[in-house]
Amino acid sequence: MMQRAWALGVVGLVVAWTSEASAQTSFGDKGDFSFAIERAMGLYSGRLRFEQPGLLPDQVIDTSGVEIGIGGALPHPSQMTRIAVDGFIIDHLSLGGSIGFASYGNDLDGSAFLFAPRVGYFAGISRHVGFWGRGGFTYYNVDGGFAGRDASQLMFTAEAMFTFAPNDGFAFLVGPVLDLGFAGGWDPGDESYRDRLLGLAFGLVGFF
């Protein structure tokens, strides 16, 4: 009798779990909003290309590493942790952006500001898993953070994020990100440079 009751209980749990998992997540409907902390942690690989005067070859610096928290974002300010807000103007289609700020001390005394508007498309895979692709532009400005020099960059940004929601209204963000700089310069000197960043980023998002 005990064995039969235990078996029926297991079957009941499996049926309940299957029924729940088969339901699509409600996030992504028209009128939904999200608030997120993005790029809180990441694995990144980047390249800085500095244009040299005359016939001199461009200077190229390759970088790679792990970024955790808000400790800083040099030499690639676009990897800094930021706060993001998005709203769904129609089902699945989002419009929003993110902002970030960093302050540096010691030998890299300065600050950096970032703004990244974007559009996105969300598709629910299951009740707990979804895919959120976003694309847009990123602009950052660094005041004195590069050896006392100012720098700015305008970039194309693409993000292919997966959402993992253990509970309703909250999810982890994980996915690849790409920032491609196409207009940037140093001051003083008015020298041109390009910033490229590829990585796997992690974050947290709440939606309502």
Image (spheres, rainbow, N blue to C red):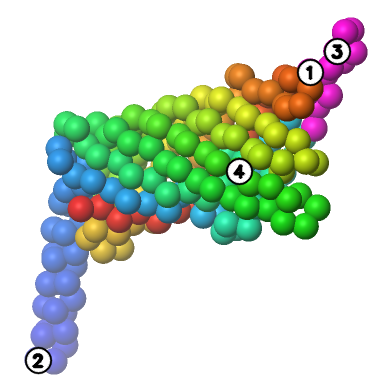
The residue beneath circle 1 is: 51
Q: Are marks 4 and 3 in contact (CB under 8 Å)?
A: no
Image location of residue 98, percent across then percent down: 42, 41
Neighbourhood count class around disc 1 (C-alpha, 10 Å): few under 14, some 14–19, many 20 upward: some
Q: Nearer the viewer, residue 101 or 29?
A: 101
* Residue 172 location (% of width, % of height): 39, 56
From the viewer's perspective, is the residue at label 3 or at label 2 nearer?
3
Q: Residue at (60%, 19%) from the top-left corner?
A: 182
In the image, which disc is placed on residue 1?
2
Upstream in sequence: badge 4 or badge 3? 3
Q: Amino acid at mark 1?
A: Glu
The part of the chain drawn in magenta is: 49-61
Camera-near label (2 vs 4) is 4
Q: Secondary structure at mark 2?
A: loop
On the picture, is 192 further left or further right than 162?
right
Three-letter code, disc 4: Ala
**Marks 1 and 3, Cα distance to the nearest angstrom?**
7 Å
Tell which residue pokes out farthest to the bottom in this image. 2
In whole angstroms, how far apart are the C-alphas of marks 3 and 2?
Answer: 87 Å
**Nearer-N-terminus badge (4/1):** 1
Point out the frontmost of discs 4 and 1.
4
In the picture, the disc for residue 112 is 4
Q: CA distance from mark 2 to mark 4?
A: 68 Å
Say what secondary structure mark 4 lies in: strand
